[in-house]
DNA sequence: CGATTCCTTGATACGGCTCAAGGAAGGTGG
DNA sequence: CCACCTTCCTTGAGCCGTATCAAGGAATCG
């Protein structure tokens, strides 16, 4: 049995403030923490270094315990959230009570964006573990965007990244087999863990088979069976929530199904008789 | 056989400028057109009235002919696009040549957003008919956002709307049957046509069965069969690209498949013992 | 009018869902 | 600490929905 999962609560903040109690008995440092712009930029992995020495601008942290909802569907929107530590899920409840998992936000991820348009949240965010989130009041953000050009760009960039992510999900759900979906899921988790400084080879799932299935458009049984199959082939080791990655390359290249339209598409691509690529230089 | 499809090229611009040649032989008024902020806001259906009398700010139009590519994957990004007239598709090409349709932009839709993050387009946009697009140079947009608060908000709003749309696609692909997907597709098309001032009851598809299938995560045969089935039941009439909507209500309520996880979810929802809804007032 | 693309329809196979049952883990109260 | 309960996970058997393969007809275009 695999044990020793990575602790999900880490205290590596460059935050100069507080950080008082050295021994952390679970989740006791609930005193307000604040992050400045630089920390925020680092967390969001924003390329353009937001080198604002503006230490006046601080963003408040908030804590949520496992199972708590950060926001619910229909709730008035006024803030975005960035995960500082912990794991969550965002879900959509379809017309008749069925839950659809949309994402599993973790350290460095932004969520809550869906509320901007209608001023009400379109989805629900639930903490899968104790979480420390940074609150980004939307009013504050837009004001900030108007004064700091790089910041405005950063906001667009992060939202664009989210959109690309959703698109790749659509693509995956539309085209890949169950095995390929689960394989991709594991690879992306492994990558994210590596980003966060954890082991990419051995980690604990923070979500149930049911939630994974919902996220991937599969049933929990299929997820379970697929993990078992990967285990038997030697690609991974599985023991309940504990996953050991054995053969990341095979997981990355695992495919299935494409034979369907591949030929038609390749033909179409090879032809491309008319329709040249057009490029435009914008001027004004 | 159904005929008399709505002409896809209409000349109802409140644009005071040009609009010279009265008889439109296909697509001959290719002289540069310009739109101001107000027109842009109307087109994008932005709630907050962008009442900028700033007629100095004009956005250039560009024309594309059927089959042309507006942008390709990997191409440097520097502009967003808003559809003024015509129909397009955006596609992702997966690791081995397979084409995945992501959206069918039409009048009032924004696309190109996926390029912001990496500065290169992640998808390809192809004209399905002759198109008239408004070019939104990204530099110009960000500059504008800094000076006009409502405009900045509008940009976020439109991007948020796109994200919500993608999320609902994910939800659909993950949970609905083939019949339900096709039904929803028809309903949303009907709605869009109504928005644009066309008939919501009788219209022409601008895309092939193959493209619809790719968009919905189905094969072209399944799309064809499903349309035929709807035809037999009397929900619609089909003749090649021509679609007549007969029973929109049935199309809207058509479902299938959910029995799977519905019970489990409803139970979970009914319980909700711990985890109270949390609401936060942002202050600063 | 031939070539190509697109659409329809049929026969068949199979991947993943459904239904079902039992076991493991974790939490709770005695 | 143990008994109980609930949630979560695994595995099996069978079926159904959709993909696959195939062939012919319709529309479009040069």
Image (tube, coloured by chain):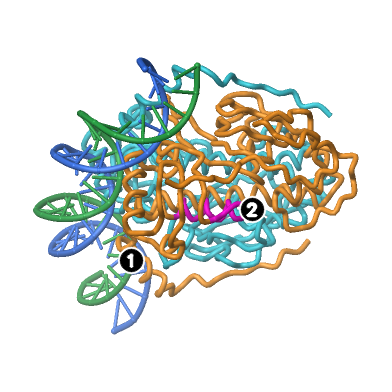
Chain colours: A cyan, B orange, C blue, D green
Q: Tell me which segment is drawn in magenta.
A: B184-200
- Decide: few, some or many residues near mark 1? Use Cα within 10 Å; few <14, some 14-19, many ≥20: some
Between A15 and A48, the residue placed more toward the observer is A48
| Badge 2 and badge 1 both on one subunit | yes
SS state under label 1: helix
- Chain-order first, disc 2 or disc 1: 2
Above or below: residue D13 compared with residue B66: below
Q: Position of residue C24 (x, y in %)?
A: 23, 57
On whether residue B191 falls in the magenta region, the answer is yes
Question: Which residue is tagged 1?
Answer: B264
Main SS of the magenta segment?
A: helix
Between C23 and A25, the residue placed more toward the observer is C23
Between the C-alphas of marks 2 and 1, the distance is: 43 Å
Q: Position of residue B145 (x, y in %)?
A: 80, 44
Label count reads: 2
Q: As drawn, is A86 to the left or to the right of C20?
A: right
Which chain contains the residue that carries disc 2? B
Q: Position of residue B97 (x, y in %)?
A: 42, 24
The circle drawn on residue B254 is none
Q: Residue at x 37, y 70 (%)?
A: B266
* Quarter containing the C terminus of chain B: bottom right
Q: Residue at x 69, y 35 (%)?
A: B133
SS state under label 2: loop
Q: Residue at x 42, y 67 (%)?
A: A97
Question: Which residue is tagged 2?
Answer: B197
């Amino acid at each position: 049995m695999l044990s020793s999962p990575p602790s999900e609560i880490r205290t590596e903040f460059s935050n100069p403030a507080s950080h008082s109690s050295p021994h952390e008995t679970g989740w006791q440092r609930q005193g307000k923490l604040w992050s400045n712009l630089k920390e925020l930029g680092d967390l969001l992995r924003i390329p353009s270094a937001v080198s604002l020495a503006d230490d006046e601008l601080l963003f408040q942290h908030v804590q949520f315990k496992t199972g708590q909802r950060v926001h619910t569907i229909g709730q008035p929107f006024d803030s975005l959230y960035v995960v500082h530590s912990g794991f969550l899920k965002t879900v959509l409840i379809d017309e008749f009570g069925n839950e659809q998992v949309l994402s599993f936000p973790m350290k460095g991820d932004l969520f809550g964006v869906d509320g901007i348009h209608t001023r009400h949240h379109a989805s629900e965010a639930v903490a899968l573990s104790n979480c420390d989130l940074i609150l980004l009041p939307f009013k504050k953000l837009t004001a900030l965007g108007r004064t700091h050009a790089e910041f405005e760009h950063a906001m667009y960039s992060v939202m664009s990244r989210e959109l690309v992510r959703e698109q790749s999900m659509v693509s995956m759900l539309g085209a890949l087999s169950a095995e390929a979906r689960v394989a991709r899921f594991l690879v992306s988790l492994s990558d994210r863990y590596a980003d966060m400084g954890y082991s990419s080879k051995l980690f604990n799932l923070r979500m149930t088979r049911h939630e994974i299935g919902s996220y991937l458009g599969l049933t929990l049984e299929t997820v379970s069976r697929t993990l078992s199959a990967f285990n038997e082939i030697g690609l991974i080791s599985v023991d309940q929530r504990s996953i050991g990655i054995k053969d990341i390359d095979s997981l990355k290249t695992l495919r299935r199904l494409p034979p369907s339209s591949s030929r038609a598409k390749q033909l179409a691509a090879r032809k491309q008789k008319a329709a040249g690529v057009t490029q435009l230089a914008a001027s004004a």
